[in-house]
Amino acid sequence: MTGWTWEYEGYDAAEARLRESLCTLGNGYFATRGALPECTADEVHYPGTYKAGCYDRLTSEVAGRQVENEDLVNLPNWLPLRFRLPGGTWLTPDTATVLDHHETLRMASGLLERLTRYDLGDGRVLRVRQERLVHMADPHLAALRTEFTGEQHFGALEVEAALDGDVTNAGVTRYRDLDGRHLTHVHSGSSAPDTVWLSCRTRTSDILIAFASRLLSEAPTAIRREDRRAVQSTRLHLAPGHTATVDKIVALHTSRDPAISDPLHAAVDRVDRVPAYDELLESHRTAWGQLWRRGELDVPGEAGSILRLHLFHVLQTLSPHTADLDVGVPARGLHGEAYRGHVFWDELFVLPYLNLHFPEVSHALLHYRHRRLGRALNAARDVGRRGAMFPWQSGSDGREEAQQLHLNPRSGRWVPDHSHLQHHVGSAIAYNVWQYCEASGDTEFLHTKGAELLLQISRFWADAAAWDPLLGRHRIKGVVGPDEYHDAYPDAAEPGLDDNAYTNVTAAWVLAHTLDVLRDLPEPRRRELDERTGLDGSELEKWEEVSRTLHVPFHDGVISQFEGYGKLAELDWQDYRRRYDDIRRLDRILEAEGDSVNRYRASKQADVLMLGYLFAPAELQGLFRRLGHELDEATWRLTVDHYLHRTSHGSTLSGLVHGWVLARERRAEAWTFCQEALRGDIADIQGGTTGEGIHLGAMAGTLDLVQRGLPGLETRGGALRLDPVPLPELSSYGFTLRYHGHWGVRLRLERGLLEIAVPASGPAPIDVRLPDRTARLHPGETGRLPLME
């Protein structure tokens, strides 16, 4: 690991899947895992390629039930390029003797390099160097350059390249009981002596997918068609000291692309017109350079290198090309098939970073939600509610994609999945609407689509809240909170919990902020909205009342995760750690023992503490005052301590949230959790999950930790508000951001000093507010503001 490269020395089959995830290349339109081109999908390797938003739905029989699942489709494999001595076996690191193997991910230029030396016997050594890119300037292109060198005497080498349509979704072991064959009508052909194509359709969504590939070699190229494959081959002569180069350039189009009539024609035309590899590489590097300038991050040491890797993967999943697509935030990126490529609430951890660098991408991701507002309205109506009930897992059309069953690999049993009761996803969407508009100044979106989203989410919460005359409070029952371990009361016949504190407090926040937005709407727009939605004054009065009377349970002087939490049994944490060592997935351990985590005060990840992640201390205290509670520092500190000792951290988001919250508490333990968040994927701390796809929310969240968490940065009330947290382990860092039309605002924090430079071009001055002072910086000015100890 260096500042701009990520390197692996030596070949290790046991680490192949992890490397392939972390060496994925993408451009926001599609991505390809970092598998070696000569290797096929097996128990070691998995060369998946995924197009953003390309889903397909199949039905499988699982545990005697018909289960329907929608998957992000594994597309035809464009990578295959294999080689051998004439008449010999194809060479791979798993079947031949490897003398040296080195892989380098060059983040500055978006390139994956590999260098392998194969010992072929009789003094023959084959040196293979490859360079791969998924083009960041033209999102439909990818390329692979392979250089073959025969050390000492060598002779002939057979090389075969292919487009392979004989692929399935089989990258996650626990999903293999499900039907994963999504591609049908696979056809192949050629359009020129050096160009082949392959087309297919998805089985139920009927998306037409087309690849075209050009193979450029110093030797003649032959073409043949096989079942579900298009193959090109060439025979190289490797004279001593001579390097033979083979370039494979690929174009991808689907029927969902704008401004084309036929994907196959578009792919063939694109690859035929593509410039030579060197010119393609130059424009690719230029595009990456522009992205790095917009996302500039200056953090010293190992943390800075890891943060750069995280930003690299965020940009490969959600680049400016994403702004042209109808897609959401896939929780595991475009890096694998875990979670089936679905969209959860992870955008809550992703958009705050994008808002301040790539607001056009945030805008598109919020449009994804707005386009599915009708489906959310129907979902609420189907359960007898008003407003919009967004799904916990979303895919192509916004219906609920959460599983009915999930497999516990520890017990081998399929158990009910009640995660669809996590209705707090609606609050996450509302929060992102508000954060985006505050950071970007996009009043047009706030007054139109944003206001509609806020209104319908508020309407759902107000309707879901039932008055309890005994408590004198409104209550929201039958939900599951962010913890996810607890989905029912012990031995209850029905799933769901009452008055999850996070759910109720965020619902109150949504209601209050929606009322503010509606009050500030221009009168003509407000009239339109009232007419379209049937909103009237009595409904707003109820929202005001509910936003002040939602029940927040307490026990033993701390905020309860949900009503009745304080009556649960304490878990013998020491005993379970002694017996199992890694207890992150405590739910699976207990289920395999015939027990249930529902019986214990044990959380998978932050739940109540998520409130400290979303809201600055003053804002959180204000929320609780609105709800009739005084949340003083002592109560919050006790609450943090309580859950800190009862969380197994079974999610990569857990370390991130705890590090953020503890940093605000100025605690020594904060950096330990920050490090866990940083290393979550590179160290695969979840035990094999990273090989199924990176954790995008955690990666983006670590970037936001430096951008907003440690500086205490808020974009609120038309100003940049900062309240920096001094962490000894990270006392000097800097970054740029885009704020209210200002491109490239630079912030740098040194011990005791905040420096802010506003570029010379810009529409208006920026107000900066610290706890003890306010400054106004005009375009072209640099402010150096001493910080309170």
Image (cartoon, rainbow, N blue to C red):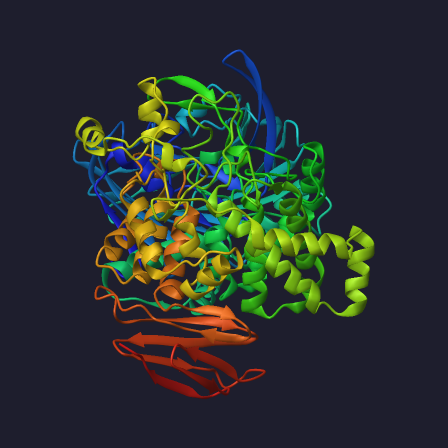
Q: Which quadrant is home to the N terminus?
A: bottom left
Residue 694 in view here: yes
The residue lying toward the viewer, choosing from 44 and 146, is 44
Residue at the front extreme of this rendering: 470
The residue lying toward the viewer, choosing from 719 and 84, is 719
Residue 231 in view here: no
- Where, by quadrant of the figure, is residue 747 drawn? bottom left
The residue lying toward the viewer, choosing from 370 and 232, is 370
Q: Which quadrant is home to the C terminus?
A: bottom left
174 left or right, relative to 11: right
Q: Residue at x 47, y 64 (%)?
A: 619
Q: Position of residue 551 (x, y in %)?
A: 52, 46
Q: Residue at x 49, y 66 (%)?
A: 357
Q: Position of residue 481 (x, y in %)?
A: 47, 40
Q: Position of residue 488 (x, y in %)?
A: 47, 28
442 up-or-down from 393: above or below: below
How many dots with numbers? 0
445 left or right, relative to 245: right
The residue lying toward the viewer, choosing from 197 and 68, is 68
514 up-or-down from 758: above or below: above
- Where, by quadrant of the figure, is residue 664 drawn? bottom left
Q: Residue at x 33, y 44 (%)?
A: 556
Q: Position of residue 76 (x, y in %)?
A: 53, 34
